[in-house]
Image (spheres, rainbow, N blue to C red):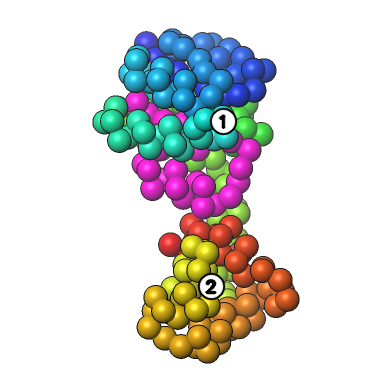
Amino acid sequence: MSTVIIADDHPLFLKGVRSFVEEYGLQVLGEAFNGHDAFELIKAHEPDLAIVDLEMPLMTGLEVAKEVKTVGLGTKIIILTFHKEIYLAQEADNLNLSGYLLKEFAIEEMKRCLDQVIAGQQFFSENLYPKITEEFSLLTDAKITPSEKKILRLIAEGLDTRQIAKRLFISDRTVEKHRSNIIQKLQLDKKTNALLLWAQKNKGLIF
């Protein structure tokens, strides 16, 4: 029987997850209401799986996953979240996590997720993919050049025009021209920080 630790700071949701995984046939070794306790339980019990909420006090689900990886534990991590931001799913993928499950679709996707993860595969909620496809299409259709993508990456990091110019050894004017072209291609509002918000929201597409 596969073993699991579950963690979520919402008691009702935690209870629901526990009920589901026990009915599925997993042995629950412990549950936590914050990320720190979740990590300590994973270290203590080394379960086959850990199902952890993305947003928890003390440590996020992704921070728990990073620590598990850092200390070399073999526990497979499944993230549970309401967040559909692509850069978060991309970060989970970069960490080689086993699953990224959206809470609003958990009832219909949980069994399939567990089936695939226990079989050694990854499961990322299928409800992410239409959004990913749409945003990749936007980036491609906008004909963003490699130079413009490089500018977007630095904008996403929070650098301003002068800092970007210094990093890339180009003039402030050249950076501003790139910014203007990107804003036009993506059809963003010129008078707000829309480009910064877009770049940070779509990190998964530009990194």
Compared with 166, 114 (above or below) is: above
**Residue 162: image location, x then y, percent:** 50, 79
Whether residue 136 appears in this view of the structure is no
> Residue 127, labelled with which disc?
none
Near mark 2 (Cα within 10 A), the count class, few <14, some 14-19 or many ≥20, is some
Q: Residue at the spot x=36%, y=33% of the render?
A: 67
Provide the residue designation for mark 2.
160
Span shown in magenta: 74-100
Q: Residue at the spot x=35%, y=14% of the render?
A: 45
Label 1 vs label 2, nearer the camera: 2
Q: Earlier in the sequence, mark 1 or mark 2?
A: 1
**Label 1 – label 2 distance at C-alpha:** 32 Å
On the rendered image, what quadrant is the C terminus found in?
bottom left
Compared with 156, 80 (above or below) is: above
Provide the residue designation for mark 1.
56
Q: Nearer the viewer, residue 32 or 182?
A: 32
